[in-house]
Image (tube, rainbow, N blue to C red):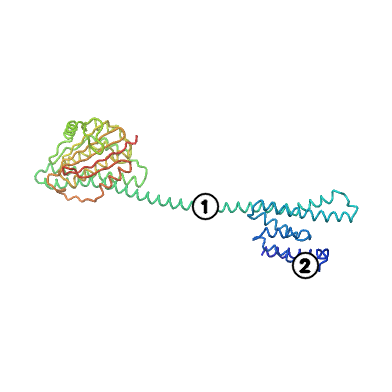
Amino acid sequence: MLDVGLALVSALECAAEGVGFARDAGLPVAVGVLFGLVAGSVLVVRRMWPVAVVLVAVAITPAEMGYLLSIVGLYTLAASEAPRRIIAALSGMSFVGVFIVAFVQTTRSVRDTPELGAEWFPPFVALTMAIGLTAPSVLLGLYVGARRRLMESLRERADSLERELQLLAERAEERAEWARGEERRRIAREMHDVVAHRVSLMVVHAAALQAVARKDPEKAVRNAALVGDMGRQALTELREMLGVLRSGDGQVAPRRAERVERAGRVPESESGSVPLAAVGVAAAAAAASASAGSYGPAGSAGSPGSVGSAGSAGSRGVVEAGEGPCLAELEELVGQSAAAGMVVQLSVMGEVRAYAREVEQTAYRVVQEALTNVHKHAAGARTHVRLAHRDAEIAMQVENEPPPEPGAASSAGLPSGGNGLLGMKERVAALGGVFVSGPTDAGGFRVSAVIPSGG
């Protein structure tokens, strides 16, 4: 509508100016009016062909018509995407055309009016008219074109940023979903580690209690006390875990310290097993006879030694405060399995030192789950637990010999969820370690892991 209106006004202007042009040229007035209507109406295509509009305006400048056509055409050309050299060339042509026509008309007027006969007057008037009819429209068109391009660039940038934000939001949602899945798996591993081991020992002790209840009431009382103690420990760990999930602060250090203080006190062995002190001595002798031989996925490091009071005290001295079990409780863990009837040997090699909480917790859980599997699948088998403190890593291995009765499982009928080995592998891999498990040539089973110490 704007272009049509401008074209109509321009056509009327050129038609009116065509009357004078026809008289000066000796043409019929109708021809001049028609010529003006056609020339002025070209303004309707200014957006599609601004160069053509300016050329028409320059062409009819000698006829002293098309001033609106020239002004609007130059503005449209300057605001368009045309190359700057074309804009400059056409603007210069229009400037020269207006200057020449104005100079000729002013000179003629001065000649007819002697009182305006100053020599400077025609050039001044011509220059003023040329600048006034070309410069404002060109400068305004350049400004509007630059602003329009800037706004388009800002809109494109805003659209690009919106797309990027949308992609980031989608990726954040994917990461959040992945994190939720990882957290669910972590909680499942923790629940499995806490419940499976304690409850497995409780079931084993309950079976032993049922067997000796009438024959040896005193021994049955001791087994019942062990069942109660293990049940309380399982409930305590579950409460700690649920407390962390509820509050998120992880303030379970007091209970952890209590467990560390209890690490040196191990129940006496029952059901034919040897005391843990004897287990440590036997393990030290076995390790010494092997001359610090290879165990685990990458061999041994340091000197062998039994886990006596000095070892447990050293472990207690390097434990960090935090949630979850630690290596200082490993002796107690092995002692509970020994009290449940397992013939188990524990040996520690290398210098005991501090580790990150995640490293100690993972090492503890690997040994715990391996012992639980022995209770489930190889009841009565002799088991060796080995721990090595190396320069940049900690290695652990739990290996059981074939059970006394081939193919025998726990007499208590312990169920197996099938997630123990997978959970151990995930834990170790999450810390950049290596986990290997499988049957031995002798018919037993071996679980080995190496975890970087983290500096």
Residue identified by numbered label 2: 33
The amino acid type found where label 1 is placed reads Ser
Does residue 85 appear left or right of residue 243 in this picture?
Answer: right
Residue 63 x, y percent position in the rendering: 78, 61
Q: CA distance from mark 1 to mark 2?
A: 53 Å
Of residues 154 and 322, the one nearer the viewer is 154
Is residue 339 shown left or right of residue 27?
Answer: left
Q: Tag 2, which secondary structure?
A: helix
Say whether residue 276 is left or right of residue 155. Answer: left
Q: Residue at x 88, y 54 (%)?
A: 111
Reading the image, the residue beneath label 1 is 160
Callout 2: 10 Å neighbours few (<14), some, many (20+)?
Answer: many
Q: Quadrant for residue 434, please give it.
A: top left
* Residue type, label 2: Val
Q: Which mark is first along the chain, 2 or 1? A: 2
Residue 253 at x, y percent in the picture: 32, 38
Q: What is the quadrant of residue 450 in the picture?
A: top left
The extreme left residue here reads 215
Tell me what residue is drawn at x 22 percent, y 50 percent.
Answer: 416
- Residue 408, placed above or below residue 273: below
Image coords of residue 156 (percent x, y): 55, 53
Closer to the camera: disc 1 or disc 2? 2
For the C terminus, which image quadrant? top left
Quarter assignment of residue 273: top left
- Secondary element type, mark 1: helix
